[in-house]
Image (cartoon, rainbow, N blue to C red):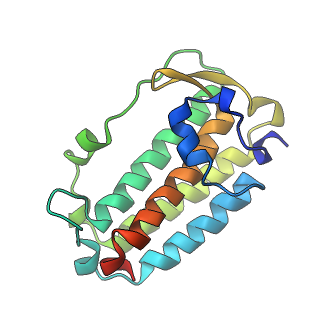
Amino acid sequence: MNQAQRPNPQEHNPYYGTYIRLVPDGNILQTLARQHEDTQALLRGLSDAKARWRPAPAEWSVKQVVGHLLDTERVFAFRALWLARGDTQALPGFDQDAWMQHTDFDAQPLADLLAEWAHCRASNISLFTGIADTTWLRSGTASDSTNTVRTWVWCTAGHELHHIESLRTVYREAVM
């Protein structure tokens, strides 16, 4: 089962290793389901007022962090799908700060953002479950580097873990 194995450093840009290293060993699909339940539990009880809290004026709010996690999960899943389906065209990167300027996550109820993310995660787990073992190592270019299908799935988990740690520490005042 190729998805259960952590991507090798040769499978991805070194930048993505910072996310992949955060993910515990084991079945990545089970990890994605379990960690998302933990994240939902952490954030579910926050009021919308607390979810608009920012550690500094120029920093993102808790809602914006959730929106960023949702956007990034969609991008990573699309990259995995693109490569899994054998497309050879290079995919562009995305500028998270530019994307944030074109949406107002703070205007949305946190409960709606969490529900949308839960639907997205469930859909992505279904997508990833259907990827054949031989396809997980298929590679292609996204964000100016060569990466495998497996890389993007593991990055999804690691990116969430990265931001959840930030929410527990930097955003502690709002989420704890």
User: Which image quadrant: the C terminus?
Assistant: bottom left
Question: Residue 145 location in percent, x, y?
Answer: 52, 22
Residue drawn at point x = 60 percent, y = 35 percent: 80
Q: Is residue 77 left or right of residue 133?
A: left
Front residue of 66/145: it is: 145
- Regarding residue 144, the answer to whether it shows in the image is yes
Q: Is residue 83 left or right of residue 41?
A: right
Question: Which quarter of the picture shows residue 25?
Answer: bottom right
Is 3 rendered above or below residue 117? above
Residue drawn at point x = 46 percent, y = 40 percent: 75
Front residue of 24/43: it is: 24
Question: Which quarter of the picture shows residue 23?
Answer: bottom right
User: Which image quadrant: the N terminus?
Assistant: top right
Question: Residue 73 location in percent, x, y?
Answer: 49, 48
Q: Is residue 70 left or right of residue 83?
A: left
Is 62 rendered above or below residue 92? below
Residue drawn at point x = 59 percent, y = 15 percent: 88
Question: Residue 166 location in percent, x, y?
Answer: 41, 64
Is 46 rendered above or below residue 74? below
Is 65 rendered above or below residue 72? below
